[in-house]
Image (spheres, rainbow, N blue to C red):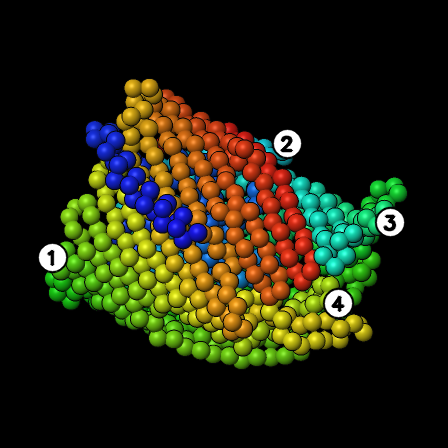
Amino acid sequence: MIKNKLQYMYILAVLAVIMPAHAEKNLPKVVTTKKLINEKDTSMVNSIKREDFTKQVNSFSVYDVLKRGVGISSSEKPGEKEVIKLRGLNQNYTRISVDGIELPSYGDENSRYFKVDIIPTPMIGEVKIINNASASYNADGIGGRIDMNTRKPTNKNTYSFDVSSGAMNSKYGHLTSLYVNKVISPTLKANFSISNSKYVNAKYETKLAIDSDTPNNYERDKDVVTQTKITTGVMGNLEKSYNRGTITFSPIYLKLNKIRDKNELNIAYNNGTGNTTIDKNEYDYREHPSLTAGLTIVNDHTFANNINLNTSISRVKTNFTKDKNEYEIDNDTGVVANIAKTHSIEKQANTLTRLSSDMTKPYDDINTIKTGFVYRDNNHNRNIVVYKKGVLSPDEDKEEIYSLNEKYTAFYIQNEAKFKNGWTVLPGIRFEKIKRKGVTATETTNTSNQNFLPSIISNYKLNDMTNFTMAYSKKVNRPSYQQLVPWEKEPKGTEVERGNPNLLAEKADTFDMGVTYNGGEYNLSANIFRRNIKNVIQEEVDTGETKEIDSATYTVLRPENVGNGHVQGLELSQKFDVNFLKPIIPGTVSLDLNQTIMSSKLRKKDGSISIFNGQSDFIANSTIGWKYKRLYASISSKFEKGRTEVNGKKTTTIKGTNYVDVYAQYELNNGGAIYASVTNLFKQGYHSSVLKKTTTTVEKRKGYRSVWVGYKVSF
């Protein structure tokens, strides 16, 4: 395995040298993602500008913008557009923010990760992938950070409109968006966007479970699922300028309703007798509405002595509801029962209050000092109500009700020194303190911890085309809210899972070293990274305890700090225009390629060794773009190698995937454009195998092709 990886690295290194020789010297500069150095505190940043992602396939949400980025894993199941992961680690190691604000999360797992499918792109001006952040950023996000910057108001009245429609497996959806920038007066300007989308994902899933102890007996699930996502997004900025600064009001309103219809049939087979038994024949209907809404006010002021003070206050709340109905189906007639066998309503509220202030002062021609603080208060509440055959069951799932309050305080100071010989050095240190109070029906817990987190980032500009960057920082990854509260999930099989208020935060020494070369017509970059992680958290660990529930004995599982490990890898990127096809194809042909090679090792306290969950050891993206007069077309491919995940006694093996998308756009005389796209051209599906104790469950999901057409115009 190591030998094969080294061979591939050598091949890529040769290509990085040879391919630029074919670069067309007089062609326009390729519009691609660029590695930025010296942008905000010399942090290592991959920046995706708006002019880049508007020519990507179905760039309706931030998920579409990010999915082909360097070192990014996206959701492996076809049609699902929720999760983005950095450096092959699972999503809990990635932090998402909008204009520096980490939005309160939503979803079943109640994690710290904000799913990017709900964030529309009309109001987004730039997306930054921050590989190794300086002390001025929150220290969480061991894998990295993704910060979306909204479009700032300009001094020109502009309008843009985008409408499209598409289908997946005969299920139709649409997208409509409007963006407006308005100059109200010489000192007052505003912009806002309104978007609405409907995305329908049709899924056909099968599961086959076989116990090695009784191989003649097995169970088969057949599920037909239609999942509909309806989103409405309103975002904007109202900017008031005065003599030495600006005051900006930024409202946000993100509404999502996820509706799922599922016909579930479970059949038990006995190969010895030939008998079959229908264990379950149900219709499952769920609605998962969520709403994230709030306001951020920012004052940016520069004093006469060149001190800049940036102060912001935010109040954002996310409400999430999970309304689930399970109906029995008559095996003989196929009629769905009138009253739900089980009806559960789960509600979560996640409220963020945040105050921050950053002060920047140029000390002399070389040094710029920056310092600041952040105070953040998060409140999380979860409640659930269960009805059985229409009758309220007040004691059902009462252990799943909890609340958690988390108070976060941080201070930092850093100094950016820019020397005349091309060196820039940014040392800094950050102090963070957390206090938590968790409350369940049976228990109240109080915990606190604090960390000093140093960092240093250094950049050397060899010339106008070449930069070298090295970075080190101490990072943390705090447990999810659900993991920290001692609540108890509904028992499954012979096991019951609880939270763990004594979980320690994962801590990591993070290292990055990279080089970028921008030759104008082509752009090359390479980055080596390593994360040494302590106190790694793993789900569903057997505690050795048992619990009696309704006269039955269950094994107690909970998340635990299981050991220490590391993740390391090499990220490569090559972007350029090529001319060897010009005698055959007129116009400009561009290539955008990136590859990520990764490995990981987790050494557990019991002496066993495995990889990190979610860790794929190879990801590759390629896009071929063609520009000819008013026509632009591209074909893109994303390959992600399969992986194995271990959670307690459960081992999951996921096969590799390769998604191919096609996009075409034609510019009209009126300044508008018509476009069409095909995603998952070759109908890539999903295949996984789960081994738990002696039972192996194989899950398969069909992949479907999605076709969209649309029209957009700006004026």
**Real-space Cα separation, disc 2 to disc 3, in angstroms:** 41 Å
* Residue depth check, mark 2 versus mark 3: number of the one nearer the observer: 3
Instruction: Tell whether 54 sits left or right of 491.
Output: left
**Real-space Cα separation, disc 3 to disc 1, in angstroms:** 83 Å
Is label 2 in contact with label 4 (beta carbons under 8 Å)?
A: no
Going from N to C along the chain, the mark reached first, 4 or 1, is 4
* Residue depth check, mark 3 versus mark 1: number of the one nearer the observer: 3
* Residue depth check, mark 3 versus mark 4: number of the one nearer the observer: 3
Q: Residues within 10 Å of mark 4 (few under 14, many from 20)?
A: some
Q: Which residue is mark 2?
A: 170
Q: Secondary structure at mark 2?
A: loop
Image disc number at residue 396: 4
Q: Secondary structure at mark 1?
A: loop
Going from N to C along the chain, the mark reached first, 2 or 4, is 2
Is label 4 in contact with label 1 (beta carbons under 8 Å)?
A: no
Instruction: Tell whether 703 sits left or right of 263.
Output: left
Looking at this view, is 546 or 381 the one in front? 546
* Residue depth check, mark 4 versus mark 1: number of the one nearer the observer: 1
Is label 1 in contact with label 2 (beta carbons under 8 Å)?
A: no
Going from N to C along the chain, the mark reached first, 3 or 1, is 3
**Real-space Cα separation, disc 2 to disc 4, in angstroms:** 40 Å
Q: Residues within 10 Å of mark 1 (few under 14, many from 20)?
A: few
Q: Which residue is mark 1?
A: 421
Looking at this view, is 573 or 274 the one in front? 274
**Real-space Cα separation, disc 3 to disc 4, in angstroms:** 38 Å
Amino acid tagged 2: Ser
